[in-house]
Image (cartoon, grey):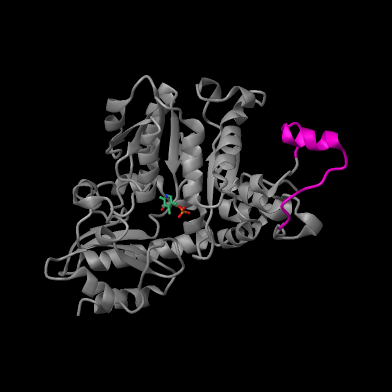
Amino acid sequence: MTERNDSWDISTRVLHADRLGGAEAGALHQPVHTGVAYGFDRAEDIAAVFQGRQKGFAYARTGTPTTQALERRVNLLEDGAATVAFSTGMAAIHALFFALCNAGDHVICTSFLFGNTASVMGSLTRFGVDVDFVDATESANVAQVLREDTRIVFVETIANPRTQVVDLEGIGKLCAERGILFVVDNTMTSPWAFQPKRVGASLVINSLTKHIGGHGNALGGAVTDTGLFDWAAYPNIQDVYKRFETAAWGITQIKKKGLRDTGGALASDVAHRLSAGMETLGLRMERTSSNAQQLCEMLEAHPKVARVYYPGLKTHPQHDRAATLFRACSSLFSFELADSVDCFEYIDRLRLAIPSTNLGDTRTLVIPAAHTIFFEAGPERRAEMGIADSLIRVSVGLEHPDDLLADFAQAFA
Ligand SMILES: *Cc1c(COP(=O)(O)O)cnc(C)c1O
């Protein structure tokens, strides 16, 4: 049997990936390898592994059989050419940008951006990279700031917390025409709901902490090369990595410079937990997306709610785009209360939903976004991002929908 059967849905493929990938002793889960160092029979073998002439493991910071099995699974989910795993989503994002950008480069970035990624963009700026933020729901806004020295266009699929859906197809086309690296953070949708490769993404980022791991019990991140980008056209590849085939240049530099320099290595036992969580990704996404849809419809009709933001709602400005591109609209939505309702008091009256900052958990989590995750952004930037003081972000869990609907309704009383 082969590892991959293209007629299988990704939810089927991932369940059988370890077995078909050749896990030791026929184990259905890749075992947890805790060793840091690997021994060799001959000095020539360790040299060959170091130089990338021979497959193998040298030191756990650059991978173990367990983290490699996880990379293979994420790669299957994204239909990728190669994947590198990291200790967190932030480590993956940091490694990608610092491995691929030089001082003087230009980066275009969606303005509706995960707060911690915005912080990385700030660091890039300090190191001499010029970053432009644009409203990426229209590809024309990206085209307008494109320059000769633009190296990367970076977007997320669904923005957190206001759920704007980026013009993924338009930007994909634009980047393909101009030969620019198109990087998509797929954390919010997850590869079950959307594969960025379908719109021409060059590299895909996933925080494995969120939907993929799915249980709020393990941190992890990954970068996947979709195989669509021609790395021969990328000016920042270091000569030392050009001894590999051209298709591998980008992911090699992300691993050899990014992973090594950040030291953001994923631990084997954590990789094992993420792998187990990943096996129910499709089931969980179906349930949380359906729960979110029902909650949003209830809230939208409620007199004490001013606005609800969820791409699954017909009133959402990018509803048609989301319906075309995504298999489901995922677990995250946000809403603004009517002026008469205090968001802190409302949250305190919820009995099931928990005030907490994570998303993609099994449990429903709520957070007053302006006062917490976007507090440091300040009032001006929050206004630009459309984050009102009363905005409540919700990450919907796997609870029974009737219990969730009852909880969010009783909290208005
Ligand atoms: C959470 C998140 C990250 C960072 O992931 P961590 O695993 O928490 O470091 C990156 N991008 C998006 C869109 C996220 O939601």
Decide if residue 284 is in sight here.
Answer: yes
Q: How many marks?
A: 0
Q: Position of residue 89 (x, y in %)?
A: 48, 50
Give the percent coordinates (x, y) of residue 295.
Answer: 31, 67
Taking the view exactly as shown, the residue that stands out farthest to the left is: 340
> What x and y, as percent, mark residue 253?
58, 33
Q: 222 left or right of 343? A: right
* Residue 53 belongs to the span the image colors magenta: yes
Residue placed most toward the observer, 81 or 13: 81
Q: Is residue 136 left or right of residue 86?
A: left
Instruction: Tell which residue pokes out farthest to the front in this image.
Output: 126
Q: Main secondary structure of the magenta part?
A: loop
Where residue 220 appears, as percent x and y from the top left, is 53, 54
The image quarter in which residue 173 lies: top left
Q: Residue at x 81, y 58 (%)?
A: 25
Image side of residue 168 versus residue 216, left or right? left
Q: Quadrant of the C terminus?
A: bottom left
Q: Which residues are magenta?
A: 34-55
Q: Nearer the viewer, residue 1 or 34?
A: 34
- Whether residue 80 is visible: no
Q: Is residue 5 magenta?
A: no
Residue at 79% x, 55% y is 24
Q: Is residue 105 above or below residue 303?
A: above
- Specify the quadrant of the image occupied by residue 171: top left
Residue at 73% x, 43% y: name it.
58
Please, is residue 347 above or below residue 119 in the view? below
The one nearer the camera, 24 or 283, is 24
